[in-house]
């Protein structure tokens, strides 16, 4: 019996640091809001997503639940598991890997959200629900390749479920809801068409990637890929220690995340960035703060720094900024630093500043 070919290690990816950072931050904190990866073909978009899934920790689930409910958190359970728990039933449990669910471009809405058997409901008086891909992705990672080729309505459904953590299916007055908390990753090649701005804004982060252009980097890509193709098991084994270090660091950041504090001055800095750079709406502000908070945890800190906010802005702002037709938006790092320094000079409404600014004033 042939053994399964190992996934290409995430740690073995050459370059693409911004892509890897965006994926890792979402893996630590799904509230970041997902990531859209834009880039030409052959830039390791799919390889990175599949590699990341292998770094995510195993989870405990209710063994006979189609949604993989957590057995110890009633607030995140489906109605059935919650009712069984309240009735005093001991739910069967099992440990399994975090799922990576891939959504085909040609998937129908019923395949994605699930389907209701109306005839059974009308004749038997019972709702019969066939779970879809969103149910299987609960507490996991949902990967949508070529997301720009999906019907806009289907993209809306995915983004709504990702934002609310719940999928609701309604047919002819019959409604079924179930938990759908997942990390959403969409990839696309801009040459094949763009997403509407309204949909772009719904992704927490966006990354624009290109092929590596320096000679040393391209040679490293060739060497590693050839090594993997010829001896995949040996290649994966050679990266095991690096993969374990990365997985442990993600787990540590997840544990530290609830303790990270966001000061009022941090909020002012982020709001100042959004205003100065002409960003519409408020999703950008929230995405930057959530991402900066997560980066602080990734860095082993419980307070935000300018570096956290700057890196978060680089990932959360470009796809939300106003642009002229046929032009790309580029963030000027010096301008971001200048805005942050200007805002950091004052403390709104007499409130305490960030931990970083307080430290400066005490010196």
Image (tube, rainbow, N blue to C red):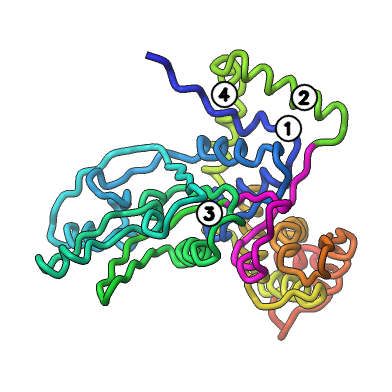
Confirm or deny contact between disc 1 and disc 2 (CB under 8 A). Answer: yes
Name the N-terminal-most of marks 4 and 2.
Answer: 2
Q: CA distance from mark 4 to mark 2?
A: 18 Å
Confirm or deny contact between disc 4 and disc 2 (CB under 8 A). Answer: no
Name the N-terminal-most of marks 1 and 4.
Answer: 1
Which of the labelled discs sits on residue 220, or is there none?
2
Q: CA distance from mark 3 to mark 1?
A: 23 Å
Q: Residue furthest left?
A: 124
Q: Identify the residue at horizontal 10%, vertical 67% (top origin).
A: 123
Q: CA distance from mark 4 to mark 3?
A: 26 Å
User: Is residue 51 in the magenta section?
Assistant: no
Residue 183 locus on image (x, y percent): 51, 53
Determine crowd level at label 2: few under 14, some 14-19, many 20+ residues with C-alpha closer than 10 A.
some
To which residue does mark 3 refer? 184
Name the N-terminal-most of marks 3 and 2.
Answer: 3
To which residue does mark 4 refer? 240
Q: Secondary structure at mark 4?
A: helix
Residue 142 locus on image (x, y percent): 49, 49
Determine crowd level at label 3: few under 14, some 14-19, many 20+ residues with C-alpha closer than 10 A.
many
Name the N-terminal-most of marks 4 and 3.
Answer: 3
Q: Identify the residue at horizontal 28%, vertical 60% (top origin).
A: 78
Determine crowd level at label 4: few under 14, some 14-19, many 20+ residues with C-alpha closer than 10 A.
some
To which residue does mark 1 refer? 14
């Amino acid at each position: 019996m042939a053994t399964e070919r190992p996934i290409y290690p995430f740690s073995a990816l050459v370059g693409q640091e911004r892509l890897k950072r965006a994926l890792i931050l979402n893996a630590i904190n799904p509230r970041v809001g997902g990531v859209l990866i834009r880039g030409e073909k052959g830039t390791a978009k799919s390889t990175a997503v599949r590699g990341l899934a292998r770094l995510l920790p195993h989870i405990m689930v209710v063994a006979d639940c189609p949604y993989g409910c957590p057995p110890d958190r009633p607030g995140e359970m489906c109605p059935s598991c919650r009712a069984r728990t309240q009735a005093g039933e001991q739910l069967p449990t099992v440990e399994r890997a975090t799922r990576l669910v891939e959504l085909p471009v040609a998937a129908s809405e019923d395949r994605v959200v699930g389907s209701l058997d109306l005839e059974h409901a009308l004749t038997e008086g019972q709702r019969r629900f066939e779970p879809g891909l969103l149910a299987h992705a609960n507490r996991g990672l949902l990967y949508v390749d070529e997301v720009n080729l999906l019907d806009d309505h289907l993209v809306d459904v995915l983004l709504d479920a990702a934002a609310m953590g719940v999928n609701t299916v309604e047919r002819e007055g019959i409604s079924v809801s179930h938990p759908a908390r997942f990390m959403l990753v969409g990839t696309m090649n801009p040459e094949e068409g763009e997403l509407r701005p309204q949909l772009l804004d719904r992704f927490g982060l966006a990354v624009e990637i290109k092929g590596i252009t320096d000679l040393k980097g391209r040679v490293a890509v060739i060497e590693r890929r050839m090594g993997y193709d010829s001896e995949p098991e040996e290649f994966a084994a050679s990266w095991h220690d690096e993969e374990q270090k990365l997985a442990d660091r993600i787990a540590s950041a997840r544990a530290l995340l609830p303790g990270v504090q966001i000061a009022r001055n941090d909020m002012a800095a982020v709001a100042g960035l959004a205003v100065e750079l002409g960003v519409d709406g408020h999703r950008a502000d929230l995405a930057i703060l959530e991402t900066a908070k997560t980066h602080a945890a990734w860095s082993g800190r419980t307070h935000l720094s300018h570096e956290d906010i700057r890196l978060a802005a680089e990932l959360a702002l470009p796809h939300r900024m106003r642009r002229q037709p046929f032009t790309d938006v580029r963030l000027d790092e010096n301008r971001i630093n200048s805005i942050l320094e200007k805002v950091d000079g004052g403390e709104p409404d007499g409130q305490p500043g960030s931990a970083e600014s307080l430290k400066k004033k005490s010196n």
